[in-house]
Amino acid sequence: MYMKTLRPYVIIFVTQTIDGRISIRGKRTLLSSERDLARMHYLRRNVDAIMIGARTVIVDDPILIPRPLNNVAKTPIRVVIDGRLSIPLDAKILDARVSTTIVFTSTRNKNTAKAREIAARNVLLEYIEPIDDENHLDLCKVLEVLKDKYKVSRLLVQGGGRLIGELVERKLFDEMIISITPKIIGKNGVPVIDREIQGIIDLNLSSVQIDHVSGEVVLVYRAI
């Protein structure tokens, strides 16, 4: 297990259907009620950075900032894990005027035309040596850079299923908050953990909250 002192405190937050899906595959999907969005923005206001994967940027195109901004002492850093540097240049998250954005990508993308164009927008690029031919990045190294170089103490992870799956499998998280919405998607949905995991990951249940207005159930788990 990676030493917690070498990485931020990692909170995974997902809103899922009762059949364990976080979106319709390939489509932007809004599952949260207004009350659930309020819970999400509360978390965003109380972390140093928010992290998502490239697929979430491509499908959802989030701006990834807390609302309302006038209640935020410091806007959290936005972090994208994109080994292939595949996010579109018109993605909202690349607007560095809104908040600092860091894109972690493979060293193989260094000095490419796309990397230069992204950097020209005042977006920070962090190059990590890939761990395979598919340009997957070592998340231990990513978290270490965030903690050491950018002083990120608390990190909120909001997707997607592959990124969450790797963090869970490698036990690179401290808290997992699952908001279950009274909806069903079925087989065409993206699962919360969108990858194979070797073995079973045990968690400790910390709290259960039932929102009788929205019908959502919020489960808070701690890593063991």
Image: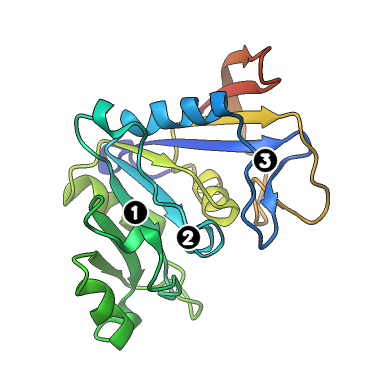
As drawn, 38 above or below 75: above
Residue type highlighted by circle 1: Val
Which is more toward the observer, 51 or 10? 51
Reading the chain from its start, which is encountered first: label 3 or label 1? Answer: 1
Q: At 23% from the left edge and 64% from the top edge, which residue is drawn?
A: 123
Q: Position of residue 97 (x, y in %)?
A: 21, 56
- Marking on residue 79: 1
Q: Is residue 49 left or right of residue 41?
A: left
Mark 3 to mark 2: distance in Å?
29 Å
* Mark 3: few/some/many CA within 10 Å (<14, 14-19, 20+): few
Q: Quadrant of the N terminus?
A: top left
Q: Secondary structure at mark 2?
A: helix
Query: Which residue appears at 67% of the width and 40% of the height?
Result: 200
Between circles 3 and 2, the one closer to the viewer is 2
Q: Is 39 located above or below residue 197 in the figure?
A: above
Looking at numbered disc 2 in the image, what kind of residue is underneath it? Val
The CA distance from mark 3 to mark 1 is 28 Å
Q: Is 38 above or below relative to 109?
A: above
Q: Is residue 67 left or right of residue 37?
A: left
Residue 37 lies, in percent from the top left, at 51, 31
Element at badge 3? loop
Per the model, the C-alpha gap separating discs 2 and 1 is: 11 Å
Q: In x, y percent, where is residue 64?
A: 39, 47
Residue 54 drawn at (x, y percent): 47, 63
Q: Quadrant of residue 106?
A: bottom left
Tag 2 residue: 57
Residue in the image at 52% along x and 49% along y: 159
The mark that comes first in sequence, 3 or 2, is 2
Q: Nearer the viewer, residue 76 or 148?
A: 76
The residue that mark 3 highlights is 200
Mark whose residue sits in front, 2 or 1: 2
